[in-house]
Amino acid sequence: MTALSRATELFGRMTGYAPTRVWSAPGRVNLIGEHTDYNEGFVLPFAIEHRTYAAVGHRGDGIIRVASTFDDSPVEVALVELSALFGGAPGEAVRSGSVPEWAAYPLGVAWAGLAFAGTPHTSGVDIAISSDVPIGAGLSSSAAIEGAAAGALNDLWLLGLDPLDMAKIGRTAENQAVGAPTGIMDQVASIMGENDAATFLDCRSLETQGVDLGFAREGLSVLVIDTHVSHSHATGGYRDRRDACMRAAETLDVAALRDVTTGDLERASAQLDDVTFRRARHVVTENQRVLDAVDTLRAEGPRALGGLLVASHVSMRDDFEISTPELDLAVESALAAGALGARMTGGGFGGAAIAIVESDRVGETTAAIAAAFADADFTDPHQFTVVPSHGVLRDV
Ligand code: GAF
């Protein structure tokens, strides 16, 4: 059964009738530009073909009810209660157990969407969600839920939101309702993705440009190596890295690390302690690598990207310190098997790496990576290829 059928079937079981609309949004792979979004820098992600579906229909009683195929119990909240639920400290409703984390994504989107549109909406809604985006793999299953819910509710409730508004609403849901202090990259990638292209996003101006990738034309595939080491951005290291970046910007007296160039790094090293300097150096050099990757793709195509991807991984491993032994092994074994480039993707501390591989060598490469994991006594990674795909859309 496809995720679309599962969402439709779940909606029917919950309500006894067919959904009015089904919308879907994809997960994403970030090609390059990690931990640069909340520093107002540059990112280059692309949406993938794995999608999350939200089947929706009106109900007349002012209740929002969400159900999903990854949790048996539907969650119901009165729409007028959403502000009280999510308006306090970030993530409080989840931490206190008032809502399960998965439900905070669609409920948070409903809350932020209504507030953004300034609509005091009283008619209720049923939402049934199903997904084929791997969860906890660093492929942004969360942005996919937010994008699908935002598309569906915008349509059903006639909120009049444009794609960038929907991305902002998704980020608000994630930051405030779920309590994960993320940037806006994943939501923009999921909502605004295009077939065969990456989305080049300036996270300060929020301007986007599609950049042609041409993997298929060049006989290349993007391999995802999911290490099965799961991570959460609502806790721990992600927040710590973000705080270090904010401290660095404050000490360097700039609005954001976006305003520091590679030429400023020597001066910055005298002003920051060693750890904070290395965190800042990752962001500053990563911003430059994104700009270089866009130029490289346009001038030479995807075969020339490998060096930038590897440099990005090394910077995340040594300066930002967000890689894991499994991610390092995924990258090293992919490169040893002939990949043109490889790096961990997403927020780090687990999740997946990507490798650009000749399409006719995918089988050999995955076998070599699996053997390296077995030798190291690591869990067998889940490996699959992805293609750059379109963003949010209405399916039914
Ligand atoms: C996670 C976050 F959600 C993004 O906003 C981004 O910061 C990324 O980690 C790191 O580049 O996916």
Image: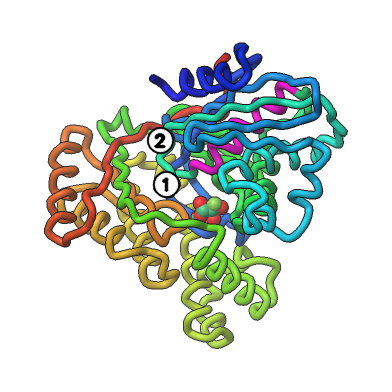
Secondary element at tag 1: strand
Q: Residues within 10 Å of mark 2 (few under 14, many from 20)?
A: many
Q: Would you identify the image quadrant in which residue 91 lies? A: bottom right
Q: Which mark is residue 324?
A: none
Specify whether 155 is left or right of 298: right
Q: Would you identify the image quadrant in which residue 327 lies? A: bottom left
Q: CA distance from mark 2 to mark 1?
A: 10 Å
Tag 2 and tag 1, C-beta contact below 8 Å = yes
In percent of width and height, residue 146 lies at 60, 38
Q: Would you identify the image quadrant in which residue 216 lies? A: top left
Tell whether position 148 is magenta. Answer: yes
In the rendered image, which residue does mark 2 sit on? 213
Any part of residue 288 in sight = yes
In the rendered image, which residue does mark 1 sit on? 31
Relative to residue 387, is residue 100 depicted above or below? below
Q: Residue at x 58, y 48 (%)?
A: 101
Specify whether 213 is left or right of 69: left
Question: Where does the magenta region start and end?
Answer: 141-156
Residue sitting nearer the eye, 150 or 184: 150
